[in-house]
Image (spheres, rainbow, N blue to C red):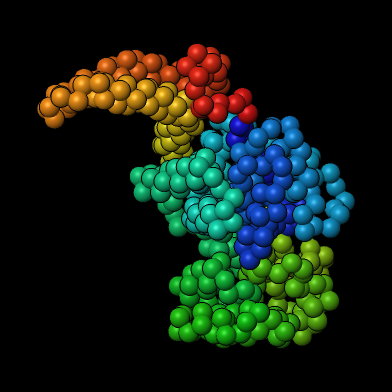
């Protein structure tokens, strides 16, 4: 059964494409249940972030399964789009899919190399798959190992140094455009994890902070935790925009919160003051047509990564060490993944031998009722030793063959099934 990764990311698709193919966390269980119902999909997990949408799946049939996954991505909960989605997608099979997830979890494939958020997002994807019961033995093992690899990479290398996340990168970019943020008015739109992280960093920068959120109560909680700032709800967005030097927006909205008319109305009140907006939401919060307004600069998440990623020298220096960790974890998982084909065969062979041993012992003891308890124990022990020694060499060779060539073991397995009349359930899928 092939293991695959089907997806699109910041490396293959611009933000205007990625935003059409996001799956909110609140609907992920529903999404995975729907995905699991596809005939060729045995297991599935989905990683949906601002930089990528990836489905990891164990398929019963490669061709049919890939076609079903592509159909799912192109149609589920999305309206028609004016482009060929397949031109932005990639498919990774087997070892490539395994290595890719480990690279993602360790931060090697992130928009900002080594970003802190990605490991938590991989964990969330795993938890969601568990909740939806769409992850079986293979994906449980794969995601647990990927998470462990990510933890090791962050603790043993400098891949997470320089304290740059998407939120802090947005602040750094803003400072590059408007100068030091101390005393500047910064409006944070969205009080989720990203917005709260940005607000904490802005406090350290000495900025005047305002936070807007769909739920004003949540905005007030963040302000309270900071001990400074103003809070409001989204209907007051234009009102707060009038006083802002910088806007950092990151909400879960599925539509534009700020359009050209809204920003133009705010700018009309403050025509001499420029406005810099960093939109780190996917889907985007700000209509890109805002860029045409005088005095307004707008950067989306793709522009952000282009501007910041090249400055992460310490993280780049850690890449060789992280790649060694990835290689180690990939090799270990690959050995387990290939050996799993042999597990039913070994179990069936052992059970068959044990059943014969027990049946023959029972017949012997029935014929020799005068055997003492010690004699019975000696005979039983001898029978167990014979079985163990007889099977040991075969089991070692089966294990070695499966580890070296996961597919090649299938031919040997079918022969053993026939010779020993086993019920191992070996298939070529």
For the question of whether residue 398 can be seen, the reply is: yes
Going by the image, does 222 lie left or right of 2? left
The C terminus, quarter of image: top right
Question: Residue at the location (67% across, 42% down)?
Answer: 41
Instruction: Tell me: residue 168, above or below residue 343.
Output: below
Q: Nearer the viewer, residue 62 or 344?
A: 344
The N terminus, quarter of image: top right
Residue 420, horizontal then vertical, whole percent: 47, 16
Q: Quadrant of residue 265?
A: bottom right
Instruction: Tell me: residue 269, above or below residue 192.
Output: below
Residue 324, horizontal then vertical, whole percent: 42, 33
Question: Residue at the location (69% across, 32% down)?
Answer: 62
Please give the count of numbered marks on the rendered protein: 0
For the question of whether residue 182 can be seen, the reply is: no
Going by the image, does 389 lie left or right of 252? left
Q: Nearer the viewer, residue 74 or 253?
A: 74
Residue 137, horizontal then vertical, whole percent: 50, 42
Question: Residue at the location (32% across, 15% down)?
Answer: 390
């Amino acid at each position: 059964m092939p293991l695959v990764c089907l997806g699109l990311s910041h490396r293959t698709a611009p933000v205007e494409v990625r935003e059409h193919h996001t799956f909110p966390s609140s609907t992920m269980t529903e999404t995975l249940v729907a995905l699991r119902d596809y005939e060729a999909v045995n297991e599935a997990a989905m990683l949906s972030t601002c930089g990528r949408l990836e489905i990891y799946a164990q398929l019963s049939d490669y061709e049919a399964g890939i076609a079903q996954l592509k159909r799912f991505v192109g149609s589920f909960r999305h309206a028609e789009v004016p482009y060929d989605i397949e031109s932005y997608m990639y498919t990774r099979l087997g070892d490539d899919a395994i290595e890719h997830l480990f690279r993602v979890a360790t931060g090697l494939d992130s928009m900002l190399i080594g970003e802190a958020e990605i490991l938590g997002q991989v964990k969330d994807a795993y938890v969601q798959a568990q909740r939806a019961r769409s992850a079986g033995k293979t994906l449980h093992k794969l995601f647990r190992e990927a998470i462990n690899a990510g933890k090791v990479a962050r603790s043993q290398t400098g891949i997470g140094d320089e304290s740059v996340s998407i939120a802090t990168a947005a602040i750094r970019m803003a400072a590059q455009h408007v100068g030091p943020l101390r005393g500047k008015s910064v409006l944070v739109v969205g009080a989720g994890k990203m917005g709260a992280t940005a607000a904490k960093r802005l406090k350290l920068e000495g900025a005047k902070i305002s936070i807007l959120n769909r739920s004003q109560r949540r905005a007030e909680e963040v302000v309270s935790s900071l001990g400074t700032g103003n809070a409001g709800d989204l209907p007051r967005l234009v009102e707060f925009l009038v006083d802002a030097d910088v806007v950092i927006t990151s909400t879960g909205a599925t539509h534009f919160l700020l359009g050209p008319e809204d920003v133009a109305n705010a700018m009309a009140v403050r025509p001499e003051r420029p406005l810099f907006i960093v939109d780190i939401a996917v889907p985007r919060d700000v209509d890109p047509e805002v860029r045409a307004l005088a005095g307004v600069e707008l950067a989306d998440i793709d522009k952000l990564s282009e501007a910041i990623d090249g400055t992460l020298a310490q993280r780049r220096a850690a890449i060789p060490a992280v790649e060694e960790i990835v290689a180690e974890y990939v090799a270990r998982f690959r050995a387990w993944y290939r050996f799993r084909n042999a597990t039913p065969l070994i179990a069936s062979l052992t059970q068959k031998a044990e059943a014969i041993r027990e049946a023959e012992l029972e017949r012997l003891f029935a014929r020799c009722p005068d055997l003492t308890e010690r004699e019975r124990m000696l005979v039983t022990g001898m029978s167990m030793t014979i079985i163990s020694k007889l099977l040991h060499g075969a089991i070692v060779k089966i294990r070695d063959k499966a580890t070296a060539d996961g597919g090649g073991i299938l031919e040997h397995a079918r022969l053993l099934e026939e010779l020993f009349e086993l019920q191992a359930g070996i298939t070529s899928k």
